[in-house]
Image (cartoon, grey):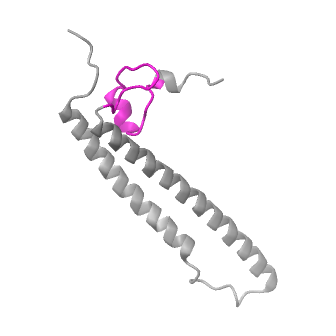
Amino acid sequence: MSEQVRYSDEELEEFRQLILSKIESATTLYEELCALLRNNEGNDIADTSPTFKVLEEGANVLEREANARLAQRQLQFINHLKAALVRIENKTYGICRATGKLIPKERLRAVPHATLCVEEKNKPQH
């Protein structure tokens, strides 16, 4: 029996549904983070003493920066998932870009946008 070179259309559809679900939840989180970044209203610090006001403003800046980084990471994750959908359409999804062998289903279920098998991913980079 020859080694499987690509996933079947049924298997690709299973992964497509998984990826669509992940995109939906990631998009929801991204939109929530963007809403937090846009929110200029809310709790005002005008009634606190100047010392606390400075400290609170500093904390707000740090929180906004952290939310901006999280939003950027979410957007990058969404883009990776969308690229995986393109690979599904091209029927190249699940093929390790380094070895050309199939990435195990367990890995793709855990990391649906993976393009490398675990062995290649864990190789030291030069």
Residue 5 as seen in the image, left or right of residue 73: left
Residue 80 falls in image quadrant: top left
Quadrant position of residue 40: bottom right
Most extreme residue toward the front is: 90
Q: Is residue 116 magenta?
A: yes
Q: Which residues are magenta?
A: 92-118
Within the image, what quadrant is residue 126 found in? top right
Residue farthest top in this picture: 1
Q: Residue furthest bottom?
A: 47
Q: Residue at x 58, y 63 (%)?
A: 67
Above or below, 78 relative to 92: below
Residue 93 on image: x %, y %: 33, 33
> Taking 107 as reference, is 45 left or right?
right
Q: How many marks?
A: 0
Q: Where residue 43 sits in the image (x, y, percent)?
A: 60, 83
- x and y percentages locating residue 60 in the rendered image: 67, 72
Residue located at (62% from left, 25% from top): 125
| Residue 11 as seen in the image, left or right of residue 114 | left
Quick one: quadrant of the N terminus? Answer: top left
Task: List the single residue furthest toward the right.
Answer: 51
Q: Does the magenta stretch mainly form a helix, a strand or a loop?
A: loop
Q: Position of residue 71 (x, y in %)?
A: 53, 59
Q: Look at 73% across and 87% down and name the residue there.
A: 48
